[in-house]
Image (spheres, rainbow, N blue to C red):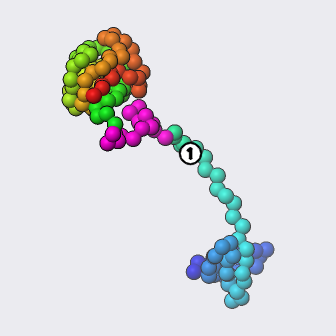
Amino acid sequence: MKKFKLTIRGNKYDVHLQSIEEGIAKIEVNGTTYEVEVHTEKKVTKTPTLVRKPVVHSSDSGKARTSKPTERKGAGLINAPLPGTILEIKVKVGDVVKIGDKLLIMEAMKMENNINADKEGTISAIKVNAGDSVLEGEALVEIGS
């Protein structure tokens, strides 16, 4: 219970706030209890609300990450994780690769990045050449079974 001493038009009042529920306050003024309606203003904040778009990773192509039992194993594309420049290609068409094998070296954001195989299979196509600039999500190498 909060207590207040108010002076209104020269008259002194002892006010005890008993409770506030759903906009109705119970107050006691000089020994008499009243129920009064409380009006509040919505506070406007000056700080803007940050709204971000959901992040969509380049490796998320909308397909399920696991293959169906009847699907060819290891088939798929290796995409660029970032925009950058292809420095060196370490494989050629027909090479057999395992998960983790280095496929190419790409410069992105002033750093050299190894692009490794995330699938097993045979290199069926190389979609880029050394010196090419690529965008995020662009196909670099195709691995077939």
Residue 48's x, y, as percent?
58, 44
* Residue 141 vs residue 34, the one in the foreground: 141
Residue 124's x, y, as percent?
30, 20
Residue 102's x, y, as percent?
22, 24
Label 1 SS: loop
Helix, strand or loop for the magenta stretch, by majority = loop
Residue at the image position 29 percent from the left and 34 percent from the top? 73
Looking at the image, which residue sits at the far bottom?
Answer: 31
Q: Quarter holding the N terminus? A: bottom right
Vertical placement of 43 versus 67: above or below?
below
Residue matched to label 1: 49
Q: Is residue 112 visible?
A: no
Looking at the image, which residue sits at the far right?
Answer: 9
- 48 left or right, relative to 128: right
Vertical placement of 61 versus 22: above or below?
above
* Residue 107 vs residue 36, the one in the foreground: 107
* Label 1 CA crowd tier, 10 Å (few <14, some 14–19, many 20+): few
The image quadrant of residue 81 is top left
Residue at the image position 66 percent from the left and 73 percent from the top? 22
Q: Quarter holding the C terminus? A: top left
* Residue 94 vs residue 33, the one in the foreground: 94
Q: Is residue 44 visible?
A: yes
Q: Amino acid at mark 1?
A: Thr
* Residue 111 vs residue 80, the one in the foreground: 80
Vertical placement of 125 versus 4: above or below?
above
Residue 37's x, y, as percent?
73, 74
Which segment is the magenta one?
Answer: 54-70
Residue at the image position 24 percent from the left and 30 percent from the top? 120
Residue at the image position 42 percent from the left and 38 percent from the top? 63
Q: Is residue 96 magenta?
A: no
Looking at the image, which residue sits at the far front?
Answer: 70
Q: Is residue 63 magenta?
A: yes
